[in-house]
Amino acid sequence: MSNELRTEIDAWIDANWDPDVPVREWWQRLSAAGFSNPGLAEPFGKGWSRAETRILAAAIRENGSIGSPAGLGMMLAAPTILAHGNESQIQKYVPKILDGTDSWCQLFSEPGAGSDLAGLQTKAVRDGDEWVITGQKVWTSEGQHADYGMLIARTDPDASKHRGISWFAFPMNQEGVDIRPLREMTGRSLFNEVFTKRHISAKLAALGFVLAALSSNAFLAIRSSQPFGTLISLRDRGMSISSRRRSISLIKSSTDRS
């Protein structure tokens, strides 16, 4: 079975791989074939086992192509939305995660709620068809580049602290969202603080009363079934794969000389 699967994958790569196409287009091809995250159930994946997914990863690597988009959207957001979202939410968010159109960050930790997420203070109050979300998040990796955030907020203040928490698909690029990069001693800013006071649509954003553990469990389930992926900055998605590799080689050569 493994030899047959490898032959099938190699044939697909031969027919579809082109180092001169933009990264965005290659990711769209992977997604359309169910190869972006093959551990997911059809039609978004293949429903493959870990062993089958490793065969795909080896084929992509050995054929000189690149893997699917990597990141928290692929690892956490897509599995969580597929497991707990309604059909409208699934169709709105999941395809754009799988083809790399949208990137995601995680809006969990707060100044007073790190490992004990049940201590979070960010609030979401229903206002008609919208939620008003107010609070502060911190240590948000790549928040300044993300399209959406997986935000958890307290929606039932009368419930015990481990309950009454909801998971939101939160648009990062909107008024009322203040993203402040935290500069490290290296000069880079991987982490961010995020302050928010914003109305967002309830119909598409909230997955209901769910604990943060849902995303954690989804990560544990998907981490080993997708052992490949490619992190590419947003500005490089339209660059051809061969051009991107040349730019990486130039950067590496410059670094080596220094």
Image (spheres, rainbow, N blue to C red):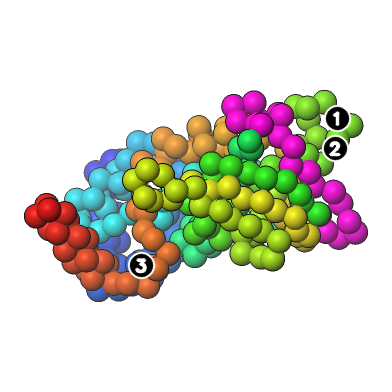
Q: Is residue 27 visible?
A: yes
Disc 1: which residue? 159
Q: Residue at x 69, y 66 (%)?
A: 175
Residue 167 image offset from top left, x and y in percent: 70, 44
Disc 2: which residue? 156
State if disc 2 and disc 3 touch (CB < 8 Å).
no
Question: Horizontally, is 103 left or right of 68 in the view?
Answer: right
Gap between marks 3 and 1 measured at Cα: 45 Å
Q: Nearer the viewer, residue 136 or 95?
A: 136
Label 2: which secondary element = loop
Q: Tell me if mark 2 has few (under 14), some (14-19) or many (20+) residues whose alpha carbon lies within 10 angstroms of its own.
A: some
Label 3: which secondary element = helix
Which tag, 3 or 1, sits closer to the chain's start? 1
Q: Tell me if mark 3 has few (under 14), some (14-19) or many (20+) residues whose alpha carbon lies within 10 angstroms of its own.
A: some
Read off the magenta span. 112-131
Q: Nearer the viewer, residue 31 or 253?
A: 253
How many marks the image carries: the answer is 3
Q: Is residue 121 magenta?
A: yes
Q: Is residue 241 above or below residue 192?
A: below
Which image quarter is the N terminus in? Answer: top left
Disc 3 marks which amino acid? Asp
Disc 3: which residue? 236
Residue 146 image offset from top left, x and y in percent: 53, 57
Disc 1 marks which amino acid? Ala
Q: Residue at x 39, y 61 (%)?
A: 233
